[in-house]
Structures are given as structure tokens and as C-alpha cells.
Amino acid sequence: MRENILEIRELKAYYKILKGDVKALDGVTFNVRRGEILGVAGESGCGKSTLASTLIYRKPPLKYISGEARLLGQDIMKMPEREFKKLRLKNISIIPQYALDAFSPTKKIKTFIGDLVSEHGIRPNKKFYDKVAERLDMVNLDPSVLNRYSIELSGGMKQRIIMIISSILDPDFLIADEITSALDVSSQRFVANLLANLRDEGIIGSAMFITHDLSILYQIAERIMIMYAGHFAEIGPTDEIVKNPRHPYTKALLASLPQVGIQYKDKRLTGIKGTPPHLLNIGPGCRFRFRCPYRTEKCEETPLREKVNEDHYVSCWNSKNIGSDNHG
Amino acid sequence: MGKYLSKKLLIYLITFFIAVTINWAIPRFMPGDPISILLSRFSGLEGGREIIEGQFVQSFGLNQPLLTQYFNFWRSLFAGDLGISIYVFPKPVINVIKEAIIYDIILLVPAIILSWIVGNKLGAYSGVNRKADNIMMPFFYFLTSAPYFWFAVVVAFIFGVKLAFFPISNAYSSTVQPGFNLPFIFDFLKHWFLPFLTLFLVQLGGWAIGMRNMIIYERSSNYSKYMESLGASDRLIRNYGFRNGILPQVTGLAIRLGTVVSGALLTEIVFSYPGLGYLMLRAILNQDYFLIQGCFLFIVIMVLAANFIVDIIYMIIDPRVRLSYSGEV
Amino acid sequence: MAAREFWKRHENLYFALTNKKVLIGISIFTLMILLAIFGPALTPYSYDEFAGEGYLPPSKDHLFGTTLMGKDVFTRTVYGLRSTFAVGFIAGTIATLIGCIIGFLAGYYGKWIDEALMMITNIFLVFPLLALLIILAAYLPYRGIMTISIIVGMTAWPWTARAVRSQTLSIKNQGYVNLSRISGISVFRILREDIAANMFSYVFMVYILQFSGTILAAVGLEFLGLGPTQGVSLGLVMQNAVNWNAIQLGLWWWAILPGLVLTILVVSLYFINTGLDEVFNPRLREM
């Protein structure tokens, strides 16, 4: 078993607003191992981006409630902000959702990178910029982009540069938040492969790839975690998740997608009826029960996380009844 | 870059053209026939009558077609001929203005630059420090709401009359010999200080309020979030925000130059400071229309020149304009 | 949808009514209006009569003291305040209207209309308006409050036009307006139903700023002796004070109090405006 870089236990983080709590991340448990890319998928609003924010950038109204998140053994939720600052970029880093808008318009790329690493006590000298140039070469960019302003760069260039910046200090854990959503199909593949390359080269220790696009995850993720409305739904090796989903939501999600690697010749694509519940002051119970075809009375209780197979966990009272019909 | 400057220049040229045209048209087309009022006033001036009438034939050329009058007006303008002043008869208006405009520059340039810098710094501080914000903001609102001349009166009363630290009229005492000598310079600075302080303080509020809001906006921008996610210190993020927040503040400087100059004119009146404002008041009181028009023209030129300088500065500090990625005019 | 819209409005109203700045601003502003309306009835003097001895500091009989010649400063101030409010309302309205119309046309139609209108706007913007006002007013031998208001209003609109233009641009490109345009709905209906509804709060804030801006511009003119030729105005009171060396003679009540009233009025408008800004821009509320 490889070492766990990140261990999340029952993590809860709510948005505290005037009218109450928006329970956007409500008890999620998982690990990220060294050398692994973990895919996180779900509809928009399922809490995947809240998970990213909770791990690296919490700002009001988002508040940590309970649970733990251990990064290399240290609980980063209870760590003083000053300490955690030192871990960022070096141990934990993020490629944000808004990568195309993550540059200050009045600073050259070079200044931006230099200022950021200086904050971590690294002198942006020639040796450092040589390393940056090497990395840029990895993503087919000329070192001359360093002397440019963000307005001079195309969207694809910005995305690649942000990936280089976020991984410049070889972080152990990198959060890639919807990094392919703003791109066209061919750039999506490039960026996804790039993430895998960074891992293969040992530049990043591990990654969490957040997306709503399961087909990309199938290509690069070792394991996939599915979230629904702030709850953990299912986690397992990619093949297992795709071929043998045990959570009704995972099933519905797979059914609603065209090609995830399996033949759907005989099957029609189906959408998921209904919309996710509002998370404001939401009570207990399985959050998928309003849309679930397998719903029973038991579902009024919040389901527990159960092991169904090696490495495969699911939170569903009826998981035993599900899964057989996909084998055929 | 070229497009940005040429567009600006075009606007300034048109503005100048309009200003001159207004100058030419107003005495001719305003109701109440101001020219005949003028003529009747001149008849009372001893000895000057012939000169002034000659002046009239030349610059007004009332018996010529309007278009010819208009061209003649431009011609004499380029020859530096703005007519003869009545208030300081028979000095040419251009000379009267030349002597006065130095005082405006001495007053305005330091006041604008210093209040812009200090105001922005204070505003940036206020934008990140809640305590400072609560204390300073009402004060800034008060400063920016005060009419320049009223604030000048308050400053004059407190520092000039109650505390008697500074003189409150004229540019220097009649007892000192103007020139490059220490007593004169000291005396000059003493007279200069209160009008300067007025202009400095009233503007300060506006800059501080503007920068405070800019900092708050920048702080919630995506690049700030990104930097914080990567462990950048508050100080660095603040510096980045300040650098970006400065841009609209420079544009704001261009927009407010007119108001600041107007404020200076009124402030000069309170302190009898012999710049264009004070001169203009004298001209109005003496119905010295040539002088009023001359002052008007030079105020326009002064504001346009200042605007142009601000444009160049803006171009230097905003890469978007420098690299022609944005046509913001 | 309609219910949500309704609720949203109430949220803003809720924030407005709980915003300290808005409340303070509105209270002071109301007080000033009451002073302008009822002030003249409260004082036994008329603004031009010699109401008592000269050189009297503030007292029960003369709240703001008397001038060198014995006119009652309080009486002159409240009458001046009336004229100031009149100028603010008229000139502020004119400037807001012109600014909104030009800004909207430029932003909505774009292309050469935009270019031309923005050119005009920018010219007005760089023009030193006080100088222009002076030269206009100097040649008008008789000036009423209306004349002054029109002159001030006609010159104060440029920044409003620019601001409204960029607002229009951003709203125009939002989905629902595009939808209305494609469906061939008339410009006036789009303006009324889509754009005006969304810009109402913005225009209201612009109006507040124009109100205070035009007041300040008019007072500047009055101070130069170019205000209304009849009656009394705050600027005129202050001009008299300066001309009669009130500061040097220690008559601070004459030189300072009328201007203080004006400044407090402008501060109250500023408070309302900033408060509303916080209400409409939650980002500023975070502070």
C-alpha cells in the first residue's frame, strides 16, 4: 500500500449566511495516495469546489465545521493560518477554476512567479528561472512568455502557465479544480495529459482532479470519488466505478453520459430527473432520495459509508441491491 | 499606443478649438449686447480710448463679415494678442496672465501630486484595516464634501487668525525684496502654505475614498484569491491590489483636474493669492472682458496640458494601453 | 420568478434600512430640507434687513450671529439653503437626464453613435467647467436660479454619461436583453422593462452625486458673484464674508457657519450614496 498523502475524515464545511447554514460539504471521507490522481465528480453544486476551497482557501462565509484533513500527517484544518501558509505551493497547491482570470493584469508572468516563490523563501534567480523555462518547455511554451503580460496570452496559454505556476515548487498534493471546463476538446485532452505527466515525472506527488466530466476522469484517474449535494456518494478504482457502480447516483450519472469507455449500443442515454436539493439548513437523510428509484424508508436516515469491495466504498442503504444489473 | 494618444490629442485639439470659438462667440451672440456695453465703458477711460478702439477694430472687426472676424480672431490669438487689459490698463492681457499663471502652477502641481500620493496611501491602509477605516472615513467624506473656498476660509481662520502661524493674503510681504534670497523664499513659502494646504486636504479625501474602494474590490478579485491559495502574504497581495487600484485613480485624476483647477481658482480668491483665479475675480468685478476671456483660455490650456501629461503617465503604467489591448479612452 | 424578484428587492431594502450610513445620511438630509422649508418661518427677520447690531456672535436672538452690518446670518443661511436646494433639484435632474440619455444611446447603439457621443462627452469632461460657467455667467447680466441651474446642469453630465454607458453595455450583453432584442421588441420597451428596471438603483445613486456636485458648482459660481442676481445664496453669503474680511475681523460665524451647513448637507448625500453602494455591491459590505 502506498503512503497516504492526504487523509480526510468526516470533513464538514458550511457557508454561514444570514438565513442559516448552507451545508455544501457535509461529512466526506477519503484518502489520496502518493503517485495517484483521484478524480472527483458530480453535478455542479455537489460540493466538489467547496471541497477544494475548504482544503486550501477558506474565506467567510465558508467555515470549517468538523472532521479532519491530514496532509502528510498534519491536520491542516486546525493548523494556524500562519503555519498553513508555509505548506501552500510547497506541499499543497491548487489550479483554480478561474485560471484564465488568475493573473494580475499589470504584472509580467515572470514577476508574478518570482513574487510568489519569494514568499516561500526561494530566491527567483537564474537557476530558478531555468527550471521555469524547463517546465514551460514541457507544455510547449517558449520561455519568452515570462516577459509577457496576461493580456498578451491566449486562454490555452494561460491555462498551461497556471498549471506550471501552481506546480512550480513540486507540491505533494495538487488540486485541479475544473481545469478543463473552459477549454475546447483538444486542449482538454492536452491539459489532462499534462496533469498525468506532472505526476509521472514526479513533479507533483498526487492530485485531485475535480470535474463534472467523467469521460476525462476515465482517461487519467486511478480512482474516482462521486459526490452528491455535499455528501460523499461513492469512491473506488476507476474501472470499478464505471463498470460496477454501487450508488444509484453514480449509475444515473454514468447513464446520462455518452461514451465513458463502455459500449452503450443498446442503451439509450438517460438524464437524471429532478434537481439537487437546496442545501440551506438541510436535515438528515440521504440527499439523493428525492430522485432515487431505489428509495426506501431507511433513506430518511443519513447512509453510512460502507466497504463493498477492495478500495470500493459507498454511502447507500441499498447498495447491495444495486450493481447486479450492470454486470450483464 | 499610438491610437490611444492620437485619439486623446484629437479630443484636446477639438476642445481647444471649441474653447476659442466660445471665446469668440460669446461677446458677439450673448443676449444683452455686451460689446456695446464694453464700448460705452471704454469711453470713460482717459487716453486709452484710441488704443482700445483700435483694438476693437482689430479683434472684433465689427464691420467685417462674421467669418472674417473669426479668422482674424484666430490670427491674433496665434500672434499672442489677447487684447489690452482694462483692469491693469494698458498692459496686454497676455502679459498679465503670464505673471499670474506661475502662481497657479506653484500651487497646483505640488498640491495635486502630494494629495494624490498621500490620499492613495491612506485609502489603501483604510481598505485593509477596519479600525483605521472607521476612524478615517468620516473625515475623508467631510474633506471631499467641503467646497474649496469654504475650507480655505476655515484653514485661514484657524491657522491664520486664531493661531496666527501663517499670513492669509498675498503671495509675499511687501517688505521683502522679490528675488533669489533666503528671506524672500521663506516669506514666499509662508504665504504659499495655507492655500496649498487647502488644496491638498480637500483633494485628499476623494483620493483616499477612491483607493479604499479599489483595494476592497481588488482584494476580492480572482488573482488575489489565487495568490492567497498559493500562500502569498497579505502584504504582497495588498501591493498587487494597490498596483492595479492605482490605474483607475490615475484616470480619476484626469477626470477631476477641472474641478481641482476650479477649486484652486476659488481658493486663491480667499487668500488673495495672485494666480489666475484671483485675477479672474478682479476682471469680473472690473468687467474686464478681455482679461476674463484670456484667463478662460489659459485655464483651458492648463487643464488640457495636465490631462495630456496624465494620459502619458497612464499609458506608461497600464500595459493594456501600452500594448494596445484596450481602447479605453 | 416574480416572487423571487420581489424578495430580492426586499432584501436590498432591508439592507438599506439597516445600513448606518444610509440612515445617518437620510436623517441629516431630511433635517436640512425641513430647515430650508420652515427655516424662514422660524426667523423673525428677513434676509436683507438689518436685524440688529453688527458683529454679534451667535446667541439666542441670532443663532448664527450677525454680519458686520447687522444682518442675521441664520436668516441668510436658511434662505440661501432654499436656493441651494432648488439648484440641486433642477440642475441635478437636468444633468442626470442628459447623462442617462447620452450614456444609454451610446451604450445601446454602439458603433458610430457611440464614438460620436463619447467624443462629445470626453470634450465636456476635459473642459474646465467652472471657467466655462464663469464666462457664460459673466455675460448674462440678469440671472435667476433657473438660469444658473440650467447652465450648471448642462455642464455637469459628462461623467454620468460615461458611467451609464458602461452600465448599459454590461446589461445589454446579458442574455435576457439579447433575447428581447432578437424577438424584435421595441427599444423603448427594452429600455423600460429590462434596462431601466436593472439600472434604477444605479441611476438613483448617480442622481444623488449629481445633486451634490451641482450644488457645489453653483456655490462656486455664487462665490464669484455670478450666482442669481436677486435674492440670497449660500455662496453669496460667503463671498460677502470674504469681501468684508470677516475672517481677519474674527467674525467666524459669518464666514464659516453658512458653509458648514452646506458641507454637512453634501456629507449627508455622500453618506447616503456610500451606504447605498454597500447595499447594492455586497463586496463593499464585507468590510
Image (cartoon, coloured by chain):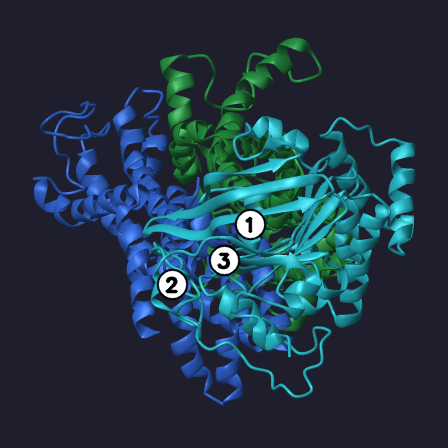
Chain colours: A cyan, B green, C blue
Q: Which quadrant of the figure contains the C terminus of chain C?
A: top left
| First in residue order: circle 1 vs circle 3 | 1
The residue lying at 56 percent from left, 67 percent from top is A250
Q: Which quadrant of the figure contains the N terminus of chain C?
A: bottom left
Distance of label 2 from label 3 (alpha carbons) = 11 Å
Considering only vertical position in the picture, is A180 above or below C59?
below
* Left or right: where C112 falls relative to B37: right
Q: State which quadrant residue C245 falls in.
A: top left
Disc 1 secondary structure class: helix
State the image coordinates of residue B118 (x, y, percent, origin top left): 57, 29
Q: Marks 3 and 1: in contact by CB < 8 Å? A: no
The residue lying at 53 percent from left, 35 percent from top is A77
Q: Viewer-proximal residue, A50 or A266?
A: A266
Residue named by callout 3:
A315
* Left or right: where A226 falls relative to B282: right
Q: State which quadrant residue B67 falls in.
A: bottom right
Check disc 1 and give the amino acid type.
Answer: Leu
The single residue placed furthest to the top in the displayed view is: B183
Characterize the local packing of mark 3: few (<14), some (14-19) or many (20 or more) Cα atoms within 10 angstroms: many
Residue named by callout 2:
A299
Q: Marks 3 and 2: in contact by CB < 8 Å? A: no
Check disc 3 and give the amino acid type.
Answer: Ser
